[in-house]
Image: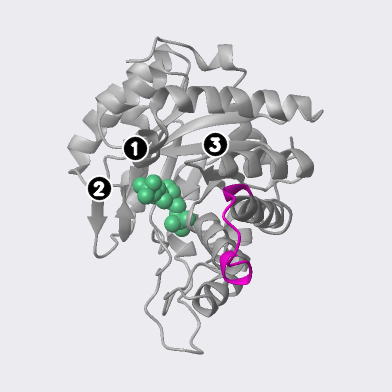
Amino acid sequence: MAEKVSYKELGLIDTREMFKRAMDGGYAIPAYNFNNLEQIQAIVTACSETGSPVILQVSKGARSYADETMLRYMALGAVKMARHKGSDIPIALHLDHGDTFELCKACVDSGFSSVMIDGSHHSFEENIALTRKVVEYAHDHDVAVEGELGVLAGIEDEVEAETSTYTKPEEVEEFVQKTGVDSLAISIGTSHGAYKFKITEGEEPPPLRFDILEECERRLPGFPIVLHGASSVLPKYVELINQYGGRMEGAVGVSEEQLRRAAKGAVCKINIDSDGRLAVTASIREYMAKHPEEFDPRKYLGAARTELIKLIKHKNEKVLGSAGRA
Ligand code: G3H
Ligand code: 13P
Ligand code: ZN
């Protein structure tokens, strides 16, 4: 186990102040998942250049892929890199879909400034008990906690749900009050991954359940809501992937207009992973197809990083509205 360190020593900040400002300003903080060097470089570069606060988001899978000790120094490196660029954007390090108390505790102890405990697959009572336990430990260390009510379809690390269960607004007040969470992820029709809706060609994806979101807002005034599964699955990347040897039929995501609308209200954090994966995969496929003689990873990973920077700037400026809010 890595030695214990507080996120404060790493120059990270927790998400509570970020959310308060996002709520007042009518925008959402981007939470970008990362697993490797090029992704974290792209996130820091794009957010520094657009002046956006940012949440660096790490799943359980990412943590074992990148190594928990390495991750701590990557986050420290992200802070230093931003400062070196002359940017003082707030940076948080957040555990995505923590599924046990032990995992959340380990992240608090190794420098995360925020953790999610996803008890959404448990009963309401068990979800409350587990979330409460994490909140008690995290708050003792001044770390913020995100909980979840309602189930998103798709894969959340090792947990896979075929169908979604919308959040029941009548449960949110009791959950927040009994657990003490700092933010709440809800299920309003988004899902994880690149295949969010089953629709035929030319058909529009169904709208998100803004009625559920609005009822949650009404019951929890001023309380930060989180949207998972919020990638837009941009057609240009899916087309490039298919053009250059990939096979992604029927990939579709959430429209940017709907995300913008959500960000203007109580949605203070928007999670984006799949869009980054698509941008990286599309650019690597294209680069490799166009440069079959090339074998220097810096070339194709560099191309992917450049595309990821473009994508993140677009999200911050045009979708989340977080640009210029650092
Ligand atoms: O919600 C899931 C995130 O996209 C993380 O995915 O568990 O494959 O790292 P992962
Ligand atoms: P996407 O798969 O839509 O990018 O969602 C990511 C997410 O919710 C991470 O927790
Ligand atoms: Zn998620």
Report the front residue among 181 and 220. 181
Identify which residue is drawn at 47% across, 76% down.
245
Identify which residue is drawn at 71% across, 41% down.
45
Contact (CB < 8 A) between labels 2 and 1? yes
Is residue 228 at least partly visible in the picture? no
Label 2 CB less than 8 angstroms from ligand 1: yes
Q: Residues within 10 Å of mark 1 (few under 14, many from 20)?
A: some
Q: Is residue 71 left or right of residue 321?
A: left
Residue 138, position in %: x, y? 39, 19
Q: Is residue 208 left or right of residue 234?
A: left
Label 1 CB less than 8 angstroms from ligand 1: yes
Query: Is 291 part of what is drawn in magenta?
Result: yes
Query: Is 106 part of what is drawn in magenta?
Result: no
Disc 2 designates what residue? 158
* Furthest-right residue in this view: 86
Dot 1 amino acid type = Lys
Q: Quadrant of residue 237?
A: bottom right
* Furthest-front residue in this view: 293
Give the magenta part as a residue range: 288-298
Helix, strand or loop under label 2: loop
Disc 3 designates what residue? 56
Identify which residue is drawn at 47% across, 32% down.
94
